[in-house]
Amino acid sequence: MNEVVSKAEIARRHSLTLAGVTTTEKNEALLLIAAKLEEYSGVILDANRKDVTAAQNKSVSKALIDRLTLTEDRITGMVDSIRLLTDLEDPSGKTLSESRRPNGLLIKKTAVPIGVIGMIYEARPNVTIDAATLALKTGNAILLRGSSSTIHSNKAILSLIHDALSESSLPPEAVQLIEDPDRELLKSLYNAKGLVDVLIPRGGKELIDTVVENSRVPVLETGAGNCHVYIDAEANPEMAISIVVNSKTQRPSVCNACETVIIHEDWAQKHLGNLIEALQEKHVVIRGDEQAAAIQPGIQAASQTDWEEEFLDLIVAVKIVPSLDDAIKHIELFGTKHSEAIVSESSGNVEKFFTLVDASVVYHNASTRFTDGFEFGFGAEIGISTQKLHARGPMGLEALTTVKYQVYGTGQIK
Amino acid sequence: MNEVVSKAEIARRHSLTLAGVTTTEKNEALLLIAAKLEEYSGVILDANRKDVTAAQNKSVSKALIDRLTLTEDRITGMVDSIRLLTDLEDPSGKTLSESRRPNGLLIKKTAVPIGVIGMIYEARPNVTIDAATLALKTGNAILLRGSSSTIHSNKAILSLIHDALSESSLPPEAVQLIEDPDRELLKSLYNAKGLVDVLIPRGGKELIDTVVENSRVPVLETGAGNCHVYIDAEANPEMAISIVVNSKTQRPSVCNACETVIIHEDWAQKHLGNLIEALQEKHVVIRGDEQAAAIQPGIQAASQTDWEEEFLDLIVAVKIVPSLDDAIKHIELFGTKHSEAIVSESSGNVEKFFTLVDASVVYHNASTRFTDGFEFGFGAEIGISTQKLHARGPMGLEALTTVKYQVYGTGQIK
């Protein structure tokens, strides 16, 4: 039996008792974890330095080193998040609905922990803490499989979590780390149906695609965002420009940033120049279709891949369309069902856009950057789901619960 | 491009307009379908006879022939179900929650159709009608892939559905049948990510396992039921016997029938004889563990597979345990997370059972046979989910919807 299977079996066993732990006990455990991380931040930083040095010696990208590196400030941020988590409502155990049937049966639909969560992620030690604490808050057991390049950091964090849990009423085995870096082990995780209830990949497109491709365990997929802002014929020009600039430039590297602006030709004739000027002021490179170039000579020509690509950078594609229908068609063709915005003064067009655009979040007169669990008021975020089953859009704690029907009878038979 | 891909692309395209169709239009289309099936039942019965004759010539099992065979009565039953479906509330378009954020954004969480459903099923022409009409009621497009042994029946049914839809405001392409019997085509369905949003296998364990194993498209899994009734130490003897007999014998071939009775030894000492007598009166074969045989000599000995197996027949396994904890452990080991019952007069034990038994439905003092969409008051049933994501337990129309966040702003940027 390899490490994945043996730890998955332990997790399964403990998931039963975790389902019966009270919210107070879970919050106490979380506060103990926060205290340990605070007290022993030096231990984590020492371990993290080993990972960072090893990564530097392998000359990996600067972005990866940045994601990998922990600082006293970053740890303080995580500790604060854990304390905030204890203030959030615990979705597990909540009665979602209740009905009395004509035969007298009382049927309660109750939210319960999913059970065992498998988390597969890249070189981000903060995910170790986030995932572990979100799982505990909802009463789930979790198996963590981070990148081998964060193994020292992750082991140090796990050791502190275990210390904290052993002082709490929760079993330390509720949080386990797969330490063996052998990639073959992932196969055991993909096949752990019956032991692991859901796999959540967090990271780049390649990682997510690999998990979706290979897993027999259901996957909660968080995906890429090729997001569009459509500017309608009669859109308010100042508002449209402000929303496009914000959606594109406020943080270009994230999934809810805008990648393509689609503009009705009537609006473009009057205001395209101003929009481009505003974007260029923010150092955005513009790639337009033929019509955009016709209206605003000098624009770089967009290629087919520009419509498909998530730039994650200060680049934007601009497409001019003769109608709302064409904008919707373009989004259907190239969108990734993440976040799509319309800037418009026509309620009929907004309604049409909201109905026909297939995305987890649709916006009227607002920036796509709001697709986020905190902005939505969830208090925590597991990720942003771009799939349609179980959870869609920003996922709060509820996404880590399932339901159980509890039926109370007095001897009813059929 | 093969039949699956080309039809999936057509379905995808039409799923957009289907999302905008009103409940009235959908109900009108369903009533037209019901009328066509009623008027042309003879055409369906003629086509069905071809399938039945072909199956008989292949000397397949009697049970399969029975599932395959349509009669005037069965068609009337289906027509009635469609008419009842029009009375049910349409979950698509419903606002599930609404919140105003401090920045003024109004966030509406709305139920919307999933989009394109792929249904893979066995030789049951009634599933063709059920699946098509449930999909239409919820605004989804559907691709049907039935068994090749029902191809004549399915083509006749599809032709009538298309006639009905062409007189309605819904596109006939909302319901499509994959006609090519080539099993290789299923691979295209498993890989139709982006075109098909969910696959629903309906049929035996082998079919479901194959789909889960191979699909990259998310699967709504409906599984087997190895259901238990646990009789607690102080359970009311008449009630316990009545619930076990009903759970086992009322319809032994279905997934919510009881397969193993777990009995506390105190109860067994006093009442096992009466229970066995009652079961034997209903011609149930008993297979017990050693302790059961010690209390009631002459009981056939249970083998390991008897604990694992879904008999789907008038056979029951009997296990005697010294405590509730042992009963829970047995269920954790052998249960399929479907339906589990406790007969008990102790509210503490019931609470423990309800918390620690991991199943879609848990019962106190009631038969397991109630796990059913109609018994739960859903009015329709897509199937019974034994998985934990998206939907669990009996699935009503809501299981065919997902959510979309609709955000209304007045120029908000981040």
Image: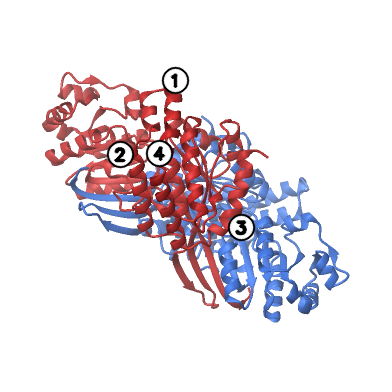
Chain colours: A red, B blue
**Closer to the camera: disc 2 or disc 3?**
3
Residue B368 image-quadrant placement: bottom right
- Residue at the image point whose x is 77% and y is 54% from the top: B305
> Marks 1/4: CA distance?
23 Å
Q: Secondary structure at mark 3?
A: loop
Q: Are marks 2 and 3 in contact (CB under 8 Å)?
A: no
Q: Which residue is mark 1?
A: A57
- Mark 1 chain: A
> Marks 2/3: CA distance?
43 Å
Q: Secondary structure at mark 4?
A: helix
Same chain? Circles 2 and 4: yes
Choose the circle earlier in sequence order: 2 or 4: 4
Tell me residue A311's x, y (percent): 32, 28
Residue A53 image-quadrant placement: top left
Label drawn at residue A328:
2
- Residue at the image point whose x is 72% and y is 73% from the top: B245
**Closer to the camera: disc 2 or disc 1?**
1
- Mark 3 chain: B
Left or right for B34, reference A309: right
Same chain? Circles 2 and 3: no
**Closer to the camera: disc 1 or disc 3?**
1
- Residue at the image point whose x is 35% and y is 28% from the top: A309
> Marks 2/4: CA distance?
53 Å
Left or right for B81, reference B403: right
Amino acid type of disc 3?
Lys
Amino acid type of disc 4?
Gly
Tell me residue B253's x, y (percent): 70, 61
Tell me residue A228's x, y (percent): 28, 36
Q: Are marks 1 and 3 in contact (CB under 8 Å)?
A: no
Q: Which residue is mark 4?
A: A42
Amino acid type of disc 2?
Ile
